């Protein structure tokens, strides 16, 4: 019997949209002139102010969760980096030396790092480091399922537990990042399974592989998809089946954390390709999660753009990013604060005695 939660995600009401849009349009500016910041303010107001329509928007203690894990497919030449780089980069995160550390320090975002299943565990005992290992890396998806259905369930629950801890610490904005050599292959396979696209339409260069490596990566993802399609349960189009067959330990835990964040009525900030695929699967499991998501940026990889399209997402930024780590999500946090600030503090035409 499944031990998964029912994911009771509250629906966001649109009943006060006229009121909120009136407040936004009555600020001292032409209607719509703040573009996506106005859309963002409306989304925040729907989430936070439906029961208290005259209160202020709050961006409380944004938290970044970076889930790290290894992938069996990385034994093949699908990346410019070797599998041990996952562990090395996690050490860099914990030492404060990565891009995401710089961005989180600058924008006052709490950074937590999670070992969801790296090849080798770390001995660190830092307060922002969590060990939720589902194994020592997934199996090689080109030849066998990444994990069992039971491990998928464990991962979803583990991710959910961590997100709830962040929210209990008074965070109402949870950002998601990832680290895992080979995870673009897993995410590409999951996107193909969901959209019925071919591997060649989706698989990208990831860390910057050459043409020969790209051809090999496409062939490996194609093998994983053909293997999955031949499974007896494949006709069910079950996202949990696809996660077990093609997924990553970090992807599964991100999905669980996103679902728990939505269940608590808090904002989910989605980063790059891998996290966007996780968001796609979170919505496949519980469609109500979509209304709690903000998409930070449009990456340069075609696969990221395809995943955003599948979610009907309009990302906030287009900076040519393709690093991952949650870097795009961290850059979106100042925009959240800006949207809240104009909604709360900008003068109205009446208060400023401006006649139009």
Image: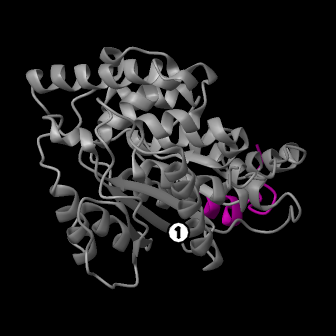
Q: How many neighbours does mark 1 have within 10 angstroms: few (below 14), some (14-19), or many (20 or more)? A: many
Image-quadrant location for residue 80: top left
Quadrant where the C terminus is found in the figure: top right
Q: Which residue is mark 1?
A: 62
Does residue 299 appear in the picture of this structure? no
Report the number of discs. 1
In front: 64, or 37? Answer: 64
Image spot of residue 57 (x, y percent): 70, 65
Image spot of residue 309 (x, y percent): 52, 25
Q: In the rendered view, how is the structure colored?
A: one colour
In front: 238, or 254? Answer: 238
Image spot of residue 247 (x, y percent): 42, 40
Q: Which secondary structure type mostly characterizes the magenta part of the structure?
A: loop
In the image, residue 255 sits, relative to residue 157, either above or below, namely above
Does residue 70 appear in the picture of this structure? yes
Span of residues in magenta: 339-356
- Residue in the picture at 17% in, 64% down: 88
Left or right relative to 95: residue 62: right
Left or right relative to 167: residue 162: left
Image-quadrant location for residue 260: bottom right
In front: 230, or 300? Answer: 230
- Residue in the picture at 63% in, 61% down: 340
Does the magenta-highlighted stretch encompass residue 238? no
- Say which element carries label 1: loop
Does the magenta-highlighted stretch encompass residue 340? yes
In the image, residue 27 sits, relative to residue 307, either above or below, namely below
- Residue in the picture at 38% in, 41% down: 146
Image spot of residue 2 (x, y percent): 68, 50
Left or right relative to 74: residue 339: right
């Amino acid at each position: 019997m499944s031990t998964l939660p029912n994911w009771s995600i509250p629906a966001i009401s649109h009943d006060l949209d006229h009121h909120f849009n009136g407040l936004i349009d009555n600020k001292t500016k032409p209607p719509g002139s703040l573009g996506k910041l106005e859309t963002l303010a409306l989304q925040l107001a729907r989430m936070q102010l439906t029961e208290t329509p005259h209160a202020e928007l709050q961006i409380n203690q944004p938290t970044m969760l970076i889930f790290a894990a290894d992938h069996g497919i990385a034994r093949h030449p699908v990346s410019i980096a070797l599998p041990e780089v996952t562990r090395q980069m996690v050490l860099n995160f914990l030492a404060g030396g990565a891009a995401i550390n710089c961005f989180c320090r600058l924008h006052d975002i709490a950074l937590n790092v999670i070992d969801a299943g790296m090849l080798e565990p770390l001995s660190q005992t830092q307060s922002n480091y969590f060990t939720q290992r589902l194994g020592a890396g997934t199996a090689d998806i080109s030849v066998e399922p990444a994990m069992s259905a039971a491990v998928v369930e464990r991962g979803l629950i583990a991710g959910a537990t961590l997100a709830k801890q962040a929210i209990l610490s008074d965070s109402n904005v949870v950002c998601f990042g990832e680290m895992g050599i080979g995870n673009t292959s897993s995410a590409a396979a999951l996107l193909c399974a969901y959209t019925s696209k071919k591997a060649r339409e989706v698989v990208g260069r990831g860390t910057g592989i050459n043409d020969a490596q790209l051809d090999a990566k496409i062939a490996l993802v194609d093998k994983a998809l053909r293997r999955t399609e031949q499974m007896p349960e494949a006709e069910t189009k079950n996202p949990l089946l696809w996660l077990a067959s093609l997924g990553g330990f970090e992807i599964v835990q991100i999905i669980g954390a996103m679902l728990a964040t939505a269940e608590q009525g808090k904002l989910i900030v989605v980063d790059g390709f891998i996290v966007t695929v996780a968001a796609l699967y979170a919505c496949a499991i519980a469609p109500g999660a979509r209304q709690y998501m903000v998409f930070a940026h449009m990456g340069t990889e075609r696969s990221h753009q395809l995943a955003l399209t599948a979610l009907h997402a309009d990302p906030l930024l287009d900076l040519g990013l393709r690093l991952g780590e949650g870097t795009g999500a961290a850059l979106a946090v100042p925009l959240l604060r800006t949207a809240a600030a104009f909604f709360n503090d900008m003068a109205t035409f009446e208060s400023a005695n401006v006649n139009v």
